[in-house]
Image (cartoon, rainbow, N blue to C red):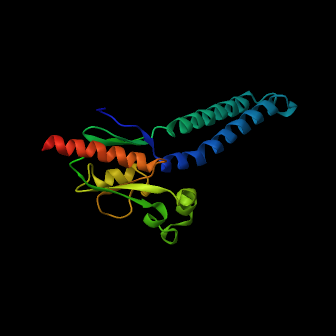
Amino acid sequence: MKREGNRYPLLIYTRMLDRWWPATLFLAVALFVLAWGISDHPAFKNEALGRMALWFAGGLALLVTLILWGLRSAAYVQPRAESVRIATPFLRFDVSYKRVRRVISSEMHVIFPSGRLSAWNREILEPLMHKTAIILELNSWPLSPRLLRLFLSPFFFRDQTPHFVLLVENWMRLSTELESFRSLRVSARQ
């Protein structure tokens, strides 16, 4: 049997980064057009430093755009032989199957009722509310809860109990892989 399952992109991070990279791309293009436009204007002929600053700011905005676009695929969940790997752009950790009490599924609008969400969070989750998420209920946290809440989206947690809400596109396939790896791990221990 394989030692690692498929990687399933975390839709929360994809959604959040998809909101930012088009804006930074627009900013980069606007700064490049502005820098190019004032280079021909007679009032700015002696302002080489200002033009250079605009070109630099445009390049920086373009670099941020590329980084944000690349980070979209850096957040994923992956079942493995010994554990479940949860990776985000700034934190990667494994959750041992020994910690997993049970795996359940639920729709996002049930986990996060829109009446309890702020307007900002409601706007982020709105296109994802009809999707089904996997909830890993745990016996204990794999890392400090403060550290996890610092580096993970608030949409990973529905309350204070040890668990993770994992929203992926193909939740049934992820659930099947998780249970397959988990059952193999349990049978190997016995």
* Residue 57, horizontal then vertical, whole percent: 65, 35
Query: Where is 7 relative to 137, above or below?
Result: above
Q: 15 or 38, which lies in front?
A: 15
Q: Is residue 89 visible?
A: no
Residue that appears at 33% across and 34% down: 4
Residue farthest to the left?
Answer: 190
Quarter occupied by residue 8: top left
Q: Is residue 180 left or right of residue 33?
A: left
Q: Is residue 142 visible?
A: yes
* Residue 10, horizontal then vertical, whole percent: 46, 46
* Residue 77, horizontal then vertical, whole percent: 39, 43
Quarter holding the C terminus? top left
Residue farthest to the right?
Answer: 42
Residue that appears at 73% across and 39% down: 30
Quarter holding the N terminus? top left
Residue that appears at 28% across and 42% down: 181
Q: Is residue 19 left or right of residue 153?
A: right
* Residue 11, horizontal then vertical, whole percent: 49, 48
